[in-house]
């Protein structure tokens, strides 16, 4: 068809840093993923309306990840702590625009792993891999004002604050503004 970009499948990827591996999720990850999403602090900031219900860990790790990957919209990843090989967080990409080479990263970290720099390390590694290995030009994070932990992740991962999108998102408690943070290919130079 003229004028239409071909559908792209989101790339399978694995990245490692000295402390974490970022990899695709599988059936064996269902229980820790469900626990991460069931955490009270995580629930507070999830970008899903309250009536969405509890996230099914198995579906998140299998059908939902495959559907997102096959559609080209994004993918779901696990953050594995290298010291004990435990899944301590989830990353997911969404809102991918293949023409503009832009995608957004979201994340949720297990309670016992928060505050140790795991999230910024994993977000940074994923953003760099998407740019260097897969040609993305812009990676975005969107943070609800008040989510200071997520704001610190954006800052520590090297993202630049760009501004506020008014009434642009939602969390379990309802509609929220969203801060937009970006990491672009030029940031690597």
Image: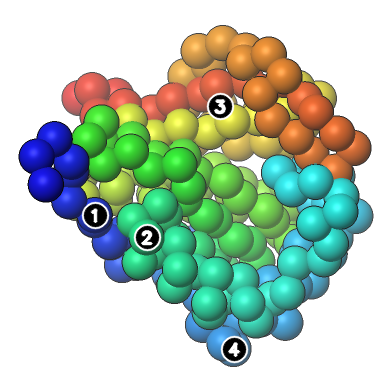
**Rounded to the nearest whole Å, what is the CA distance between mark 2 and mark 4?**
23 Å
Disc 2 secondary structure class: helix
* Number of numbered discs visible in the structure rendering: 4
Residue at the spot x=50%, y=13% of the render? 162
**Residue 30: percent from the left, percent from the top?**
66, 81
**Residue 20: percent from the left, percent from the top?**
49, 63
Disc 4 secondary structure class: helix
3 and 4 marks in contact (CB < 8 Å)? no
- The tag on residue 7 is 1
- The tag on residue 28 is 4
Kindly identify which residue carries mark 2: 71
Numbered disc in front, either 2 or 4: 2
Q: Earlier in the sequence, mark 2 or mark 1?
A: 1
145 relative position to 185: left or right: right
165 over 123 or under it: above or below? above
40 over 3 or under it: above or below? below
**Residue 113: percent from the left, percent from the top?**
72, 59
Q: Nearer the viewer, residue 96 or 87?
A: 96
129 over 32 or under it: above or below? above
Disc 3 secondary structure class: helix
Residue at the spot x=80%, y=46% of the render? 49
Residue 152 lies in quadrant: top right
Q: Earlier in the sequence, mark 3 or mark 1?
A: 1
Kindly identify which residue carries mark 3: 155
Q: Earlier in the sequence, mark 3 or mark 4?
A: 4
2 and 1 marks in contact (CB < 8 Å)? yes
Residue 178 appears in view: yes
Q: Earlier in the sequence, mark 2 or mark 4?
A: 4
């Amino acid at each position: 068809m003229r004028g239409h970009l071909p559908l792209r499948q989101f790339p399978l990827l694995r990245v490692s840093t000295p402390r974490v591996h970022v990899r695709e999720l599988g059936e064996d990850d269902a229980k820790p993923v469900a626990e991460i999403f069931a955490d009270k602090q995580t629930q507070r900031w999830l970008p899903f309306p309250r009536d969405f219900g509890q996230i099914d860990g198995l579906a998140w790790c299998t059908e939902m990840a495959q559907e997102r990957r096959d559609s080209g919209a994004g993918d779901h990843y696990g953050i594995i702590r290298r010291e004990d090989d435990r899944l301590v967080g989830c990353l997911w990409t969404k809102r991918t625009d293949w023409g503009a080479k832009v995608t957004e990263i979201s994340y949720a970290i297990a309670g016992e792993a928060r505050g140790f720099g795991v999230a910024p390390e994993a977000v940074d590694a994923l953003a760099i891999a998407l740019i260097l290995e897969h040609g993305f030009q812009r990676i975005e994070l969107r943070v609800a004002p008040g989510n200071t932990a997520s704001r610190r992740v954006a800052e520590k991962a090297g993202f630049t604050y760009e501004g506020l999108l008014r009434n642009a998102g939602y969390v379990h408690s309802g509609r929220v503004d969203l801060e937009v943070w970006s990491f672009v290919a030029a940031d690597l130079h």
